[in-house]
Image: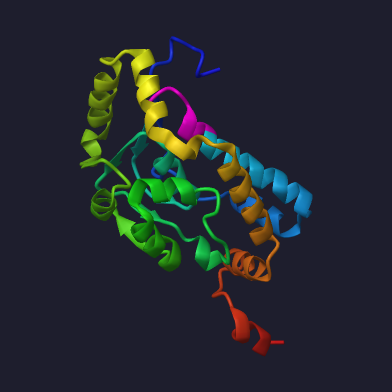
Amino acid sequence: AIDGDPEIRVLVLTGSGEAFCSGADIDWMRARLVDTPEANRVHAGMLADLMQRLNGVSKPTIARIQGPAYGGGVGLIACCDIAIASETSVFALSEARLGLAPAVIAPYVIAAVGQRQARRLFLTAARIDAQEALRLGLVHRVVPTEHLDKAVEAEVGCLLAGGPEAIAHCKRISLGNLSKDPERTRSAELLTRLWASPEAREGLSAFLEKRRPRWGDEQRGDQ
């Protein structure tokens, strides 16, 4: 695959259209409400595998962020070695407002921005702009949209100047515990449990129905 292909030296991850990643597909989210725990466990495992493989691929990776990045999109950015954003990009980890938690992406986001900053992003679901993402360490550079491709090309040039095996060793050294499977297993199991929780069902239903979620006592008071 990619790791064993000497013709591939650098991977650039970007979105199609104006967004880098606007979050999960609506139909996919709706299916999580009705699928069995076993089916949801498979989906959670696939998400965890995606993040772990992107994070651990031996080739250097660059996130080219041309627009909004929400939820798992922030996780994809955190899994990349280098992140370059246009100045109009915005970011949010909005899982808590859906009755969920950023389970499978949390280890990578924490590694990118630090535990204290990650707490605020996870708990408040605050939307941040490109400059704040730069300040927190989620992205490495912020450039005008018209200069984004040139900035990415310059970074690719720097990576191509290094020896391929040396680059792979540098990446392996820096990954530490994030490359280990137990983290993937724990995060996938947590996400499976969260999808089955009453809060997730209320949060996702509210999102799909375009209404404000009713949590806890507020929800019981309607019964």
| Residue 110 left/right relative to 139 | right
- Foreground of the two, 45 or 182: 182
Q: Which residues are magenta?
A: 53-60
Residue 54 lies within the magenta run: yes
Residue 54 drawn above or below residue 163: below
- In depth, the one of 214 and 107 nearer the eye is 107
Question: Is residue 25 a member of the stretch shown in magenta?
Answer: no
Residue 157 position in % (x across, y down): 25, 19
Q: Where is residue 77 drawn, in percent x and y?
A: 40, 42
Image location of residue 72, percent across then percent down? 49, 48
Residue 64 quadrant: top left
**Image: 100 above or below 83:** below
Q: What residue do we see at 60% from left, 53% from top?
A: 26
Placement of the C terminus among the 4 image quadrants: bottom right
Res 130 visible: yes
Question: Which quarter of the rendered picture does the N terminus lie within?
Answer: top right
- Residue 150 left/right relative to 60: left
Q: By what rule are the colours in the image chosen?
A: rainbow
The residue sitting at 48% across, 31% down in the picture is 56
